[in-house]
Amino acid sequence: MTTEGHIESLERRHRDLDREIEDELNHPSHDDLYIAALKRKKLEIKDELTRTRANVS
């Protein structure tokens, strides 16, 4: 996979997690631990995106 493809994949996963978090928060009986895990994963992806973009420049 090219670096650009990898970045696009990470961006897509980041957006998907954002939607999943939003959906879970809108659920009446949402699971706070699950939301926290999703947010941690989203942050990990953001960090990887930052590192990957820095290596491209």
Image (spheres, rainbow, N blue to C red):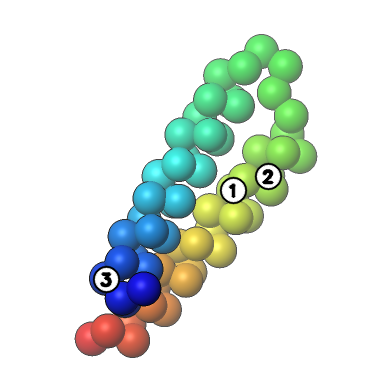
Query: Which of the two discs, 3 and 1, labels the residue nearer the N terminus?
Result: 3
- Residue density around tag 3, few if under 14, some if 14–19, many if 20 or more, within 10 Å: few
At horizontal 44% and vertical 51% (from top left) the residue drawn is 14
- Residue density around tag 1, few if under 14, some if 14–19, many if 20 or more, within 10 Å: some
- Residue at the spot of label 2: 36
Do callouts 3 and 1 mark residues in contact (Cβ within 8 Å)? no
At horizontal 38% and vertical 59% (from top left) the residue drawn is 9
Residue at disc 3, secondary structure = helix
Alpha-carbon span between mark 2 and mark 3:
29 Å
Query: Which of the two discs, 2 and 3, labels the residue nearer the N terminus?
Result: 3
Do callouts 2 and 1 mark residues in contact (Cβ within 8 Å)? yes
- Which image quadrant for residue 32? top right
In this view, which residue lies farthest toward the top?
28
Q: Is residue 46 above or below residue 27?
A: below
At horizontal 56% and vertical 63% (from top left) the residue drawn is 44
Q: Amino acid at mark 3?
A: Glu
Q: Is residue 56 above or below residue 39?
A: below
Q: Is residue 40 above or below residue 25?
A: below
Q: Is residue 30 left or right of residue 10?
A: right
- Residue at the spot of label 1: 39
Q: Amino acid at mark 1?
A: Lys
